[in-house]
Image: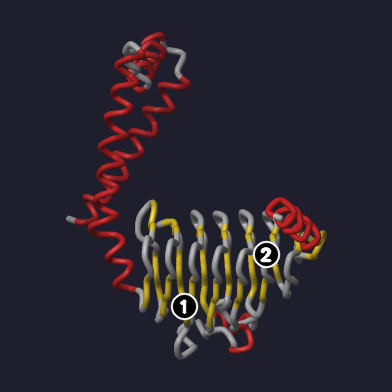
Amino acid sequence: MQSNLSYKSKTSRFNVHQFKIWLKQSDSQFAKTLFKLLKAILVCDIRFPRLINVLLYRTLTLFRDSFEFVSRVLFITPAFRGRCIHSGKQLLLYGGLPFISGPLNISVGNRCRISGHTTFSASNHTPTPLLKIGNNVGIGWQTTIAVGTEVHIEDNVRIAGRSNLFGYSGHPIDAQRRANGEPDDMEQIGAIHLKRDCWLGTNVIVKSGVTIGEGSIIAAGSVVTRDIPPFSIAAGNPAKVIKSIKANQDDSLQSKEAYHA
């Protein structure tokens, strides 16, 4: 019975596919007319006056935003707090609930903004993997933070979308051990430290064992494999310091002091 149903399903798909080919390739006037008719139905578009379009848009976005607000306040944020060992005030989770896997301990400071399209994971081979997020931190869309031993993100750090912090690799270097499903080696697992006021651009990758210094900026698409000193701009694969911004900061502080003098 099951084989008969499977055969019928395959036959049905085959017939639909053949029908599409016939519509597109047939020289028959009937096929051409039917193709135009079906295409017109497929792209059917009702043209309302602009005022009605604006009212529809604002009504739909009002309902959508209201639903998202209620869901975030009553369900999503409390659920995320339930997964944390500590969570501060004014936590904003936008776009849903982050995906969390592994035995991860999470501590979040005050006034943090975290995209719901993020992934937080932990290595199963360390006793207490910790993700420690300071105050006023922003973590962007589709960011992945894989915690080996500890990922420490200090105050005022900005992490742009699609960035990846890899504290562990998940697989051993040896191909045969990897094929056998064995875990990564302990020397592949390490901590990551983002010091206060640093900024990671879009698609930045940070490897285990790396510390990014205070106030530093990592250019979009960079791969950080070693420590970056404070108040630097780094770029490339592997990321290298291309400019110091400490002098600019000192000039700014001096100008402020002169202004207030």
Residue 114 locus on image (x, y percent): 44, 59
The residue at the point 49 percent across, 71 percent down is 133
Q: Which residue is mark 1?
A: 122
In this view, 85 is above or below 236: below
Q: Is residue 237 above or below residue 9?
A: below
Question: Looking at the rendering, which quadrant does residue 40 occupy?
Answer: top left
* Cβ–Cβ under 8 Å for marks 2 and 1: no
Q: Earlier in the sequence, mark 2 or mark 1?
A: 1
Residue at image location 70% in from the left, 68% down from the top: 224
Q: Residue at x 36, y 79 (%)?
A: 85
Helix, strand or loop status at disc 2: loop
Percent coordinates x, y for residue 29 in the rendering: 41, 8
Up/down of 125 relative to 121, above or below = below
Q: Pick whichever, 163 or 94, lies toward us.
A: 94
Distance between the alpha carbons at the discs numbered 2 and 1: 27 Å
Describe the colour scheme in one phrase. Answer: secondary structure
Which residue matches tag 2?
Answer: 215
Q: Secondary structure at mark 1?
A: strand
* Count of numbered marks: 2
Residue 2 circle label: none
In front: label 2 or label 1: 2
